[in-house]
C-alpha cells in the first residue's frame, strides 16, 4: 500500500505538495519524485524529516517551521523513516542546504553569504552594506584617570606660583594640555574590509575613532557646499579643497568617515584611493572606473581622493570644470606635491588639526593596548596617532630602539636648522627639503586659527615643536656660539609671532628687537608719578632657547633674549642691563589688542636662575610708537599686575612705558628695521 507523504518546499513562494511512494522504496527514490514535482530545483536538494505537532501544516504554509530538520539518509527505506504518517502534518522538508541554513541559522546563513560576496566582489559587498545603512560601530568611554598618571602635574595657573630652580619648565611647552575628566567616543569597526573594497594601497587598522575634528570638518564642508548650491546654476563653479595635515594624524581616516556618512545618507560619492581606479557609489550601485575615464554620474558626486606614494593628485575626471561639485584631497603639508593642480583649479587649502591625547588613547584602547601609554608618548613625541600605535605595539627593547631612531631624525633636522636658519620659517607652508624627509618628527603642522562655522577660517597653518622633550633635543644641537645675525635668523625662523601677529605688529616687533639688541643709546622709560629712567640696550644676544635663558649670565652681565622656540604670552623679549635691572618687553601696536603678560611673566620667572629672579629688579615695559597708546597699555597692565607676586619670594614687577618711533632713522650696531623687514 502506497504512502502519501506531505512535502514542504520553503522558498519566496513556498510550496506544499504530496508525493506517493512504496514502503520499501528508498529515500533516494522519494527525492527523485520530489524533483519531478519541483523541476526548477537543483541536484543538491536535500530531504529532511520534519516531525511536528498539529500546527505544523499551518506554520509551514506561513514559511515558519519551528523545528530543526533531521537530514534523511538516501539509502534508508521509506517505511523505516516514516512508520507513521499522520494526516495534517508535514513529513518531508525539501530544500537546498543554503535554504535550510537560512531557516534554522539565519545569522550563519547571512554571514556566509556576505563572505562569499566579499571574496568575489568586495566593492559590491561594501556598497550593499553601507548604502542607506549605519556602518557597524560602538561607543566607548575613557576617564582622565585611565590616561593621565596621577603624578603628572597640572599646568600652572593663578596669580602666584611657588617656584624652585629645579622645577621643569613644562607649562611653556605645548605638551601641557588639558585632558577632560571624561571622554566619550564612537568607534567604527571593520575598516580593513573597507580598505580592500576601495583598493587602498596603504595599511589601515580595523578600527577608526571618529575624532571631533572629523565631525567639525564635515559640518563646515556641508555648509560651504550648501552655500554653493544656493548660487544661480550658471555661477556655480564647484568647491575644490586640499585638506593638509601632519603625517599620521588620520587624514585617510577622515575620508573613510566622510564616505561612510555620505553612503549612509544615500548621497552620491566617488573616491580614489589608488592609481588603479576610482569608484562611484550612488543609487545605481557601485562602479569602478579607470582613472582616465570620465563618467556622467560624477556630476552629482562629492569626489574624495587620498594622497600616498601611488596617488599624488586627483585623477583627471575629478578636475574637469564641470566635474564633481565638491572635491576633497587629503594630503601632507607639502605644496610641492599639489600646488600645480590647486593653482590651475582655483582650489583652496584647509589645514587639519592635530589629535587630542584622549583620541589617541581611545585608538590604543580599541586596539587592545594600554590607553595610558598614549599620554606618555604624546607628551614625549607629540600628538601623532601613527607614532603612538607603532611604539605601543613594540616590546621594551624594540621601543627603545625605535625611539633612538626618532631622536636621530629630530637631531638631524635640528642641526640643519641651526646650520642655516635663514632658509626656514615656521610660518612657511612647507618645510624646506634641506631639512630632510624626516623633519616631521621634530616640527609638527597645525592650523593657525580655530575652526569656526566658516571653513575658510582654516586656510593657514604653521609649524611648531610640540613637546619639551623635542624642544630639548633641538636646543641640545645648538650649543655652538652663535653670531648676532644667526640669533636673529633663528628668532625669525622659529618665533610663532611670525604668524600669530598681524603684519604691522610683527614688523614693529622687529623694530623693537633690532633697537634693544643692537646696543647704542639707552631708551627713556616712564611711569606715572615717577621720574623717568634710562633703559640701557645691549648687543650681547642670547639664542632664543629656553636653555639659554635658564643659563643666562649674572646680573652684572648685560644680555638680550628673544623667545624663539617657545611662546611666552605677552612677552616679546627680556633685557638685562648688567646693573641688576631686568626688563620684560612687550611691543604693542594699534592693529591688535593688548596681550596679557601674567602667564608669560610666570613662566619667565620660572625659567631664570634664582639669583636673577630673587635679586634682580624686574620691570614690565610696554613699547609702542605712540605716547597715548603706550599710556593706555601702562594703565591697563598696571591694573592687571597690581598686587600680583611671583614665587615664594613674592617677586613684584613694575609696569613702565617706552615710546619708540617706527621710523627710527639710524640704529647703531649691526641691525636696522630695513634689515628686519627683508624677511617679509
Image (cartoon, rainbow, N blue to C red):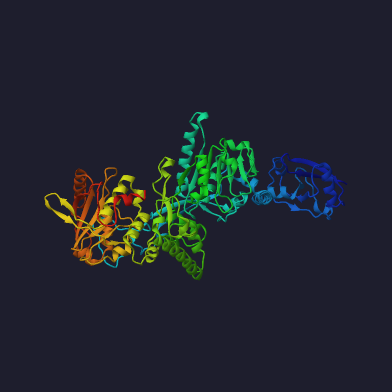
- Judge whether residue 272 can be spotted in this image: yes
- Residue 136: x and y in percent read 56, 49
Asked which quadrant contains residue 323, the reply is: top right
Asked which quadrant contains residue 12, the reply is: top right
Q: Residue furthest bottom?
A: 397
Label count reads 0
Left of 464 or right of it: where is 22? right
376 in relation to 46, above or below: below
- Residue 549: x and y in percent read 29, 63
Left of 47 or right of it: where is 187? left
610 in relation to 342, above or below: below
Closer to the camera in the image, 420 or 9 = 420
Closer to the camera in the image, 671 or 253 = 671
- Residue 485: x and y in percent read 33, 59
200 in relation to 227, above or below: below
- Residue 352: x and y in percent read 45, 49
Amino acid at each position: 500500500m502506497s504512502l502519501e507523504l506531505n512535502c514542504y518546499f520553503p522558498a519566496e513562494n513556498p510550496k506544499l505538495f504530496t508525493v506517493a511512494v512504496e514502503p520499501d522504496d528508498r529515500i533516494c527514490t522519494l527525492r527523485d519524485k520530489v524533483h519531478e514535482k519541483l523541476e526548477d530545483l537543483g541536484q543538491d536538494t536535500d530531504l529532511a524529516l520534519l516531525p511536528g505537532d498539529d500546527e505544523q501544516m499551518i506554520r509551514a504554509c506561513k514559511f515558519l517551521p519551528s523545528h530543526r530538520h533531521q537530514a534523511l539518509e538516501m539509502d534508508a527505506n521509506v517505511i523505516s523513516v516514516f512508520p507513521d504518517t499522520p494526516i495534517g502534518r508535514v513529513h518531508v522538508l525539501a530544500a537546498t542546504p543554503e535554504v535550510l541554513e537560512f531557516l534554522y541559522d539565519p545569522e550563519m546563513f547571512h554571514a556566509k553569504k556576505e563572505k562569499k560576496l566579499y571574496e568575489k566582489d568586495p566593492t559590491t559587498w561594501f556598497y550593499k552594506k553601507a548604502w542607506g545603512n549605519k556602518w557597524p560601530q560602538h561607543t566607548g568611554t575613557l576617564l582622565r584617570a585611565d590616561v593621565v598618571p596621577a603624578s603628572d602635574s597640572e599646568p600652572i595657573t593663578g596669580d602666584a606660583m611657588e617656584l624652585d630652580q629645579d622645577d621643569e619648565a613644562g607649562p611653556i611647552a605645548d605638551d601641557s594640555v588639558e585632558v577632560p575628566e571624561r571622554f566619550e567616543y564612537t568607534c567604527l569597526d571593520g575598516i580593513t574590509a573597507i580598505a580592500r573594497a576601495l583598493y587602498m594601497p596603504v595599511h589601515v587598522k580595523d578600527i577608526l575613532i571618529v575624532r571631533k575634528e572629523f565631525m567639525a570638518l564635515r559640518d563646515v564642508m556641508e555648509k560651504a557646499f550648501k552655500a554653493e548650491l544656493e548660487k544661480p546654476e550658471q555661477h556655480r563653479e564647484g568647491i575644490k579643497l586640499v585638506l593638509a595635515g601632519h603625517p599620521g594624524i588620520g587624514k585617510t581616516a577622515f575620508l573613510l568617515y566622510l564616505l561612510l556618512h555620505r553612503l549612509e545618507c544615500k548621497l552620491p560619492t566617488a573616491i580614489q584611493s589608488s592609481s588603479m581606479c576610482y569608484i562611484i557609489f550612488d543609487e545605481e550601485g557601485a562602479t569602478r572606473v579607470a582613472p582616465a575615464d570620465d563618467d556622467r554620474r560624477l556630476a552629482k558626486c562629492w569626489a574624495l581622493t587620498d594622497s600616498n606614494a601611488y596617488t599624488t593628485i586627483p585623477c583627471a575626471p575629478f578636475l574637469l570644470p564641470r566635474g564633481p561639485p565638491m572635491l576633497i584631497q587629503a594630503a601632507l603639508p607639502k605644496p610641492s606635491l599639489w600646488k600645480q593642480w590647486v593653482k590651475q583649479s582655483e582650489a583652496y587649502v584647509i589645514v587639519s588639526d592635530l589629535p587630542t591625547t584622549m583620541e589617541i588613547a581611545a585608538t590604543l584602547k580599541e586596539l587592545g593596548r594600554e590607553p595610558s601609554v598614549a599620554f606618555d608618548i604624546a607628551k614625549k613625541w607629540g600628538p601623532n596617532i601613527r607614532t603612538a600605535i607603532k611604539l605601543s605595539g613594540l616590546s621594551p627593547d624594540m621601543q627603545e630602539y625605535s625611539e633612538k631612531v626618532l631622536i636621530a631624525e629630530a637631531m638631524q633636522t635640528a642641526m640643519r636648522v641651526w646650520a642655516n636658519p635663514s632658509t626656514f620659517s615656521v610660518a612657511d607652508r612647507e618645510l624646506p627639503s634641506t631639512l630632510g624627509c624626516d623633519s616631521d618628527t621634530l616640527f609638527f603642522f597645525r592650523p593657525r586659527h580655530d575652526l569656526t562655522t566658516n571653513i575658510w577660517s582654516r586656510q593657514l597653518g604653521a609649524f611648531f615643536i610640540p613637546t619639551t622633550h623635542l624642544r630639548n633635543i633641538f636646543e641640545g644641537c645648538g650649543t655652538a656660539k652663535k653670531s648676532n645675525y644667526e640669533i636673529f635668523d633663528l628668532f625669525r625662523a622659529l618665533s610663532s609671532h611670525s604668524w600669530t601677529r598681524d603684519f604691522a605688529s610683527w614688523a614693529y616687533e622687529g623694530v623693537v628687537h633690532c633697537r634693544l639688541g643692537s646696543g647704542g643709546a639707552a631708551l627713556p622709560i616712564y611711569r606715572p608719578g615717577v621720574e623717568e629712567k634710562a633703559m640701557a640696550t645691549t648687543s650681547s644676544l642670547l639664542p632664543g632657547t629656553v636653555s639659554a635663558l635658564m643659563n643666562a649670565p649674572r646680573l652684572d652681565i648685560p644680555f638680550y633674549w628673544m623667545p624663539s622656540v617657545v611662546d611666552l604670552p605677552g612677552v616679546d623679549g627680556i633685557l638685562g642691563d648688567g646693573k641688576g635691572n631686568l626688563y620684560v618687553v612687550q611691543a604693542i601696536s594699534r592693529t591688535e589688542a593688548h596681550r596679557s603678560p601674567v602667564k608669560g611673566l610666570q613662566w619667565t620667572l620660572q625659567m631664570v636662575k634664582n639669583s636673577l629672579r630673587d635679586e634682580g629688579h624686574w620691570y614690565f615695559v610696554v613699547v609702542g610708537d605712540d605716547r597715548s597708546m603706550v599710556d593706555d597699555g601702562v594703565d591697563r597692565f598696571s591694573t592687571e599686575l597690581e598686587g600680583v607676586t611671583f614665587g615664594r619670594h613674592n617677586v613684584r614687577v613694575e609696569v613702565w612705558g617706552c615710546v619708540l618711533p617706527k621710523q627710527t632713522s639710524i640704529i647703531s650696531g649691526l641691525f636696522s628695521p630695513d634689515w628686519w623687514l627683508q624677511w617679509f
